[in-house]
Amino acid sequence: MKKGISCERKQAWISSGKAGAGNGFLMEVCVDSVESAVNAERGGADRIELCSGLLEGGTTPSMVKQSVQIPVFVMIRPRGGDFLYSDREVEVMKADIRLAKLYGADGLVFGALTEDGHIDQELCLSLVGKTLYLRSFDMVQDPMAALETLLTLGFERVLTSGCDSSALEGLPLIKQLTDQAKGRIVVMPGGGITVKNLQRILEGSGATEFHCSARSSRDSGMKFRNSSVAMGASLAHSEYSLKVTDVTKVRTLNAIAKDVLV
């Protein structure tokens, strides 16, 4: 049996940005750099999910909280891959949670599963309140039962692609989850959301919050380039092509959501 992160309750943090406050909807943008965080805010994002290793689905980041004024939720994930964590990895998450609080994070993004595909309640017990359950939810055995478990544990929202490859593909299940939630927990679609499909996802799901990256590629400023070397396992990602949040894409997504939901 793995050890829980803590038995104590989280201290109350500032408002996490409920849907309906201000805009009537909430757009969360996932970022992995100071530049992307600033661009997301400039484009009109309501909240930031801060993580690194976006190509792996996100791992715990360095803090960029001081660079923006909008709420920043910090991902707590010690590695890529599955969501079954060892005792040593739990200790790493404990340290990351302490660091996130120290730097003023507005909330946490977290998820853990048991080996048989259920929510790991022991690890989640201390992560209540302004906490979002990340897309490990899409790996659960029974999503409808898992949603009720998250409610029992005190989670405010869950990020999901409807247990499919993208939010568009998983739209029928996202709709079912939203209907089942009945406002008790926010079901937030995420995964492959673009300006081309956001309207369909919002209209088809009944969601009032959504999660996106809104990134574009930018060529590196390096003049000397060694094309024989790749930093990391992903050979498809060039060190000389940078992915950053695109202000124009964020603004366009914001406008689409406003047109649908306001």
Image (cartoon, rainbow, N blue to C red):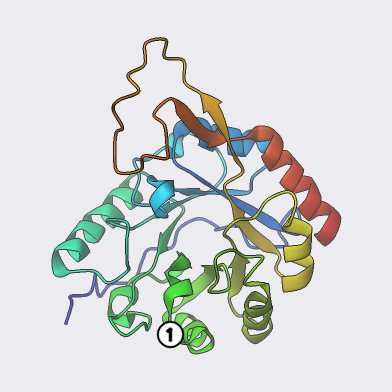
Residue 36 rendering spot, x and y as whole percentages: 52, 35
Q: Is residue 262 visible?
A: no
Question: Across the whole image, how many numbered discs are drawn on residues?
Answer: 1
Q: Is residue 148 left or right of residue 74?
A: right
Q: Residues within 10 Å of mark 1 (few under 14, many from 20)?
A: some
Nearer to us in this view, 229 or 43? 229
Q: Is residue 154 above or below residue 245?
A: below
The C terminus appears in which quarter of the rendering?
bottom right
Give the residue number, with chain letter if any, for mark 1. Answer: 141
Q: Is residue 170 above or below residue 141?
A: above
Q: Residue at x 58, y 76 (%)?
A: 185
Q: Residue at x 69, y 83 (%)?
A: 179
The N terminus appears in which quarter of the rendering?
bottom left
Q: Residue at x 27, y 56 (%)?
A: 78
Q: Residue at x 64, y 45 (%)?
A: 45
Nearer to us in this view, 170 or 244? 170
Quarter where residue 122 is shown: bottom left
Residue 234 rendering spot, x and y as whole percentages: 35, 43
Q: Is residue 32 visible?
A: yes
Q: Is residue 39 left or right of residue 229?
A: right
Q: Is residue 38 above or below residue 20?
A: above
| In the image, farthest residue toward the left | 88
Residue 106 rendering spot, x and y as whole percentages: 46, 53
Residue 173 rendering spot, x and y as whole percentages: 63, 79
Query: Label 1 is placed on what type of residue?
Result: Gln
| In the image, farthest residue toward the top | 223
Q: Is residue 172 left or right of residue 191?
A: right
Element under label 1? loop
Quarter where residue 190 is shown: bottom right
Q: Is residue 58 above or below residue 246?
A: below
Nearer to us in this view, 115 or 65? 115
